[in-house]
Image: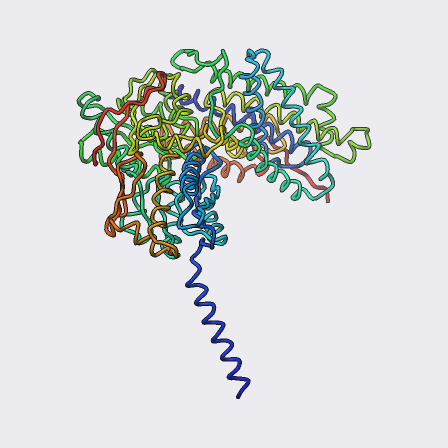
């Protein structure tokens, strides 16, 4: 009987001990560090944007650490490469979880984000989607998932509305070439919304598989349909490839694109084909007054080679990391995931150092920075000029 | 008709790229019995090296091509010597696994050296428009088609009329007999890798000139592989023609039917063809005497 009692007592003690350890140690938090994770395309065609977003988050962490860290703890950024493959986004998140991560700021591209949403919900991991806005991430609201930036639907719709109101002739025909995945579905969502709300004349959408770079048949098909406006829904170098084929047939087109088309390497590829096209964005462009503080701290944080990889996506990575760090800071000396989520959705503004206006989330609204500005991109001149003010679409 | 001819030309352009890479696959398989799953990556590596040569040395295309041929041959031979030669005598499956590992390594090395950004491959040949009747092509697109025809002819002549080509065919037919006849089988394997690197590397240059040189170019290897199956794994020229077929069928089906059929149509054709000719359109049926 004594032996049974002894065993039971030891087992009970073990359970109590394990419960108290679990309560004390939040995932990704040690005495000296707090780990924030990214799962981003650091390789593949999307590496141009994935690496930039990673460096943006590193700059935010270095900035916080230079000021003494967060309540005595250093912020550590851990980034996993998903190679722009949704299955690897899941693997990357699982690896981060195994190693211990407090929250997530890089959530992969659209399809990758969609793939990890159930895990984020189940594990109650605070996450700020900023790399590739995905409506499904916040609509309906997921308890721990937040999003910065307008969705691709809004970004492309804003351009289509501008083109419809100010550029295209009456009765213009609209076409779209979009990727055959979640990202493409969002881009086509904007197109279909324009069909519905603006009453534009649309031709059958053309879809292409991820990885495709030759658009001869697709452009020929749209040329036969006599389109005047094209939504060039390439992720990165696909957009200039579409422009090249269109220029071959001297097609006179107004083009709407996604924000990657404002990145210098993509503008460089598009320059020879003579098109001035449109894009949309919800943040201040690089080189503007709004990005001045980021540029300054980035110079102190990154090497010369790393600075070369910085672009517009660094700003979104920076803003997301800044918000996560501030939410953790507001939780005091014993930060928990639940507290960070509470702070994020408290309605109190988060300062983004001028990249955007101060941002807020509420329990009912997990999205911020949704106002879009339409940009005119002249790749030959190397200029990106706003043609509208920020507006909600 | 104008539309059809332009779809056809567009298909021939991309088909030429697939065809060249497919020839690379077939040359190695025909000679060594190994499927090189790093063919797309080797193509990409040669394209990147060529891009560096073209931009750093500012070489005209007439000088660049011979230089690239030498560089590509060296790359192919070196890869064979380092990664494949030590595996000789091991099961084919193990060698194939090595090529998969090589593929992943090459992708990472390329990003490490050249970075992740896409860049234009500018050469003086690029940018002009050529009109052949109703068909419009960029000069670099016509270059891809001409390159395919020249390489296909060269491969045909090499295997048919040269001593080394005959030795390679002999090795493909029966390695042991070839060895007994004095053929240096190891050197033949190295040569096959060198030739495959040159042929697919030229495809890489043509593609980079048309689109851009970017770290996802290796994907072309995956797209060209079905062409090799269609043409016949042991038929370099047949594989090249398989590439043209895949390109043309893809663009025609996308143009006239759409719905993303560009990618699927080639596979549908392969399934149908393989049901009738399991060794491919131009592959040789293997006979076993019992």
Please state which of residues B288 and B21 is positioned toward the viewer in this rendering.
B21
Q: How many marks?
A: 0
Residue B260 sits in quarter: top left
Q: Residue B128 in the image: x percent, y percent?
A: 43, 11
Position in image of residue A101 (x %, y %): 45, 51
Q: Establish if A135 lies above or below A249.
A: below
Q: Nearer the viewer, residue A204 or B44?
A: B44
Extreme bottom residue here?
A1
x and y, in percent, of residue A39 in the image: 44, 44
Camera sees residue B38: yes
x, y (%) of residue A8?
A: 50, 80
For residue A297, which quarter of the picture? top left
The residue drawn where x is 53% and y is 40% is B275
Q: Is residue A188 left or right of residue B281?
A: left
Between B43 and B283, the residue placed more toward the observer is B43
Q: Is residue B40 among the parts visible in the rendering? A: no
Name the side, left or right, on which B208 lies relative to A219.
right
Q: Residue at x 28, y 26 (%)?
A: A375
Seen in the picture, residue B110 relative to A340 is either above or below; the reply is: above
Pick the front one: A84 or A25: A25
């Amino acid at each position: 009987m004594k032996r049974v009692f002894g065993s039971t007592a030891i087992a009970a003690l073990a359970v109590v001990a394990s419960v108290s350890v679990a309560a004390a140690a939040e995932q990704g938090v040690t005495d000296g560090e707090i780990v924030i994770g990214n799962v981003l395309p650091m390789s593949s065609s999307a590496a141009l944007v994935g690496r930039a977003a990673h460096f943006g988050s590193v700059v935010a962490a270095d900035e916080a650490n230079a000021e003494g860290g967060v309540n005595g703890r250093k912020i550590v950024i851990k980034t996993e490469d998903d190679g722009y493959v949704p299955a690897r986004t899941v693997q990357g998140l699982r690896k981060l979880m195994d190693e211990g991560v407090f929250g997530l700021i890089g959530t992969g591209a659209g399809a990758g984000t969609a793939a990890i949403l159930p895990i984020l919900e189940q594990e109650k991991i605070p996450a700020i989607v900023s790399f590739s806005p995905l409506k499904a991430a916040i609509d309906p609201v997921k308890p721990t998932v937040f999003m910065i930036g307008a969705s691709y639907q809004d970004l492309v719709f804003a351009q289509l509305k501008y083109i419809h109101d100010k550029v295209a002739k009456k009765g213009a025909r609209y076409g779209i070439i979009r990727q055959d995945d979640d990202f493409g579905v969002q881009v086509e969502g904007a197109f279909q919304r324009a069909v519905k709300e603006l009453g534009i004349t649309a031709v059958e959408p053309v879809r292409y598989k991820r990885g495709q770079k030759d658009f001869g048949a697709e452009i020929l098909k749209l040329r036969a349909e006599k389109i005047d406006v094209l939504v060039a829904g390439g992720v990165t170098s696909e957009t200039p490839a579409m422009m090249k084929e269109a220029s071959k047939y001297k097609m006179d087109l107004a083009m709407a694109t996604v924000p990657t088309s404002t990145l210098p390497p993509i503008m460089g590829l598009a320059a020879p084909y003579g098109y001035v096209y449109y894009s949309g964005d919800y943040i201040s462009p690089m080189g503007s007054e709004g990005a001045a503080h980021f540029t300054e701290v980035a110079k102190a944080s990154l090497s010369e080679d790393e600075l070369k990889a910085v672009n517009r996506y660094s700003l979104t990575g920076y803003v997301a990391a800044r918000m996560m760090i501030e939410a953790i800071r507001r939780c005091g000396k014993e930060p928990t995931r639940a507290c960070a989520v509470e702070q994020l959705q408290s309605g109190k503004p988060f300062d983004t150092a001028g990249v955007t206006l101060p941002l807020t989330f509420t329990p009912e609204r997990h999205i911020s920075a949704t106002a879009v500005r339409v940009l005119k991109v002249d790749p030959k001149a190397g200029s990106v000029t706003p043609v509208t003010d920020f507006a909600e679409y | 008709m104008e539309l059809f001819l332009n779809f056809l030309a567009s298909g021939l352009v991309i088909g030429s790229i697939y065809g060249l890479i497919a020839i690379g696959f077939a040359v190695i398989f025909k000679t060594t019995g190994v499927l090189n799953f790093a063919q797309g990556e080797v193509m990409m590596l040669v394209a990147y090296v060529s891009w560096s040569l073209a931009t750093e040395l500012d070489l005209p295309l007439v000088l660049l091509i011979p230089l690239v041929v030498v560089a590509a041959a060296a790359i192919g031979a070196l890869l064979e010597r380092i990664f494949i030669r030590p595996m000789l005598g091991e099961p084919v499956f193990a060698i194939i696994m090595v090529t998969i590992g090589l593929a992943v390594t090459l992708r990472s090395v390329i990003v490490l050296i050249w970075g992740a950004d896409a860049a234009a491959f500018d050469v003086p040949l690029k940018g002009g428009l050529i009109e052949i009747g109703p068909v419009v092509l960029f000069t670099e697109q016509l270059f891809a088609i001409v390159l395919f025809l020249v390489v296909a002819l060269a491969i045909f002549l090499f295997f048919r009329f040269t001593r080394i080509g005959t030795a390679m065919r002999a090795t493909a037919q029966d390695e042991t007999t070839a060895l007994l006849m004095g053929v240096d089988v190891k050197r033949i394997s190295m040569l096959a890798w060198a030739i495959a690197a040159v042929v697919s590397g030229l495809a890489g240059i043509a593609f980079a000139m048309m689109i851009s040189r970017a770290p996802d170019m290796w994907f072309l290897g995956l797209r060209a592989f079905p062409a090799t199956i269609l043409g016949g794994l042991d038929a370099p020229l047949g594989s090249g023609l398989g590439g043209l077929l895949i390109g043309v069928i893809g663009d025609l089906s996308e143009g006239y039917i759409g719905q993303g059929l560009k990618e699927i149509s080639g596979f549908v054709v392969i399934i149908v063809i393989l049901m009738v000719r399991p060794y491919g359109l131009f592959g040789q049926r293997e006979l076993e005497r019992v």
